[in-house]
Image (spheres, helix red, strand yellow):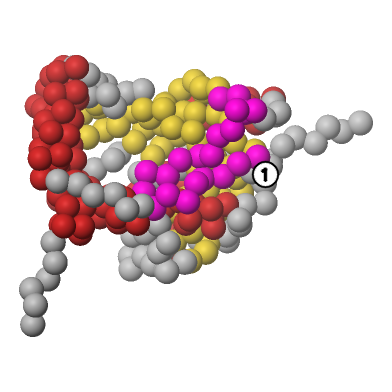
Amino acid sequence: MIVRQPTLAVALIVKNEAKHLEACLNTVQGWVDEIVVLDSGSTDDTETVARQFTDKFFSNTNWPGFGPQRRLAQSYVESDYVLWLDADERITPELRSSIQNAVRADKPNTIYQISRLSWVFGRFIRHCGWYPDRVLRLYPTQLTQYNDALVHEKVEVTSSMAVETLSGDAIHYTYDDIHHYLVKSAGYAKAWAEQRQQRGKKSSISQGMIHAMGCFLKMYVIKAGFLDGKQGFLLSLLSAHSTFVKYADLWVKTNTTPPKD
């Protein structure tokens, strides 16, 4: 009697990721059963690169937010398990082995988190609260999905599910340079402020300042970011700035009005 092995898909949501996508997919090619890529309107060669690895390339340019976009991407997955990746991530051999063992084991009601090791501004960041950066990324396709948050989306977990940590790291090349950081953080801040505004939340400049200072102290002092050298200082400072901006953006949206004609 032949026992059917569970199948595994890799799913990504992307936009203008031609620079990273090939290196990412090279780390999963040959050992996954399916690759699903959902694009949100790339203007570079993202589609050309993706189609070198899969014919399951889809597009949704009416951006609904990160959570809804991931839910749409998962609807295209046919495999038993789905592994989520971002284009700027790479699967290491140890993590690959751990993923394959988990899929073969096929434990009921079990989802898996992976650790990410980020390369930022010329250095692997092992402090600042950034490592191990554990994120839920592998689960049975029919068991769960991402929530519908516009930003900082999360996999929906119920009390009946067990969460296990896989061994090995995903290498995360998170920012190309300072400009890339500022563009990404501005996008996150805008989505965060819009989501809070929709929930009737408000903010103040003083809240932004307090949270920003708290962010810097937590990352650089409490989480020992100083051990990551100049990169640790820079990352802590930039994170504090990003924290202030999102609260300031919410304040602008909810406490200011345009001038009368």
In the drawing, does residue 144 fall left or right of residue 18? right
Main secondary structure along the magenta-highlighted residues: loop
Q: Write the residue at 80% across / 36% down.
A: 4
List x then y, in percent, for residue 176. 22, 45
Q: Looking at the image, which is closer to me, 182 or 158?
A: 158
Point out the image quarter for the C terminus: bottom left
Q: Does the magenta stretch include residue 158?
A: yes
Q: Which amino acid does label 1 sit on?
A: Gln
The picture quadrant where one finds residue 227 is: top left
In the drawing, does residue 81 fall left or right of residue 83? right
Q: Looking at the image, which is closer to me, 215 or 72?
A: 215
In the drawing, does residue 142 fall left or right of residue 191? right
List x then y, in percent, for residue 34. 61, 49
Answer above or below: position of 259 versus 235: below
List x then y, in percent, for residue 115. 42, 26
Answer above or below: position of 63 versus 209: below
The picture quadrant where one finds residue 258 is: bottom left
Check disc 1 and report the residue beneath it: 142
**Residue that sits furthest to the bottom in the current view:** 261
Residue numbers of the magenta segment: 143-163
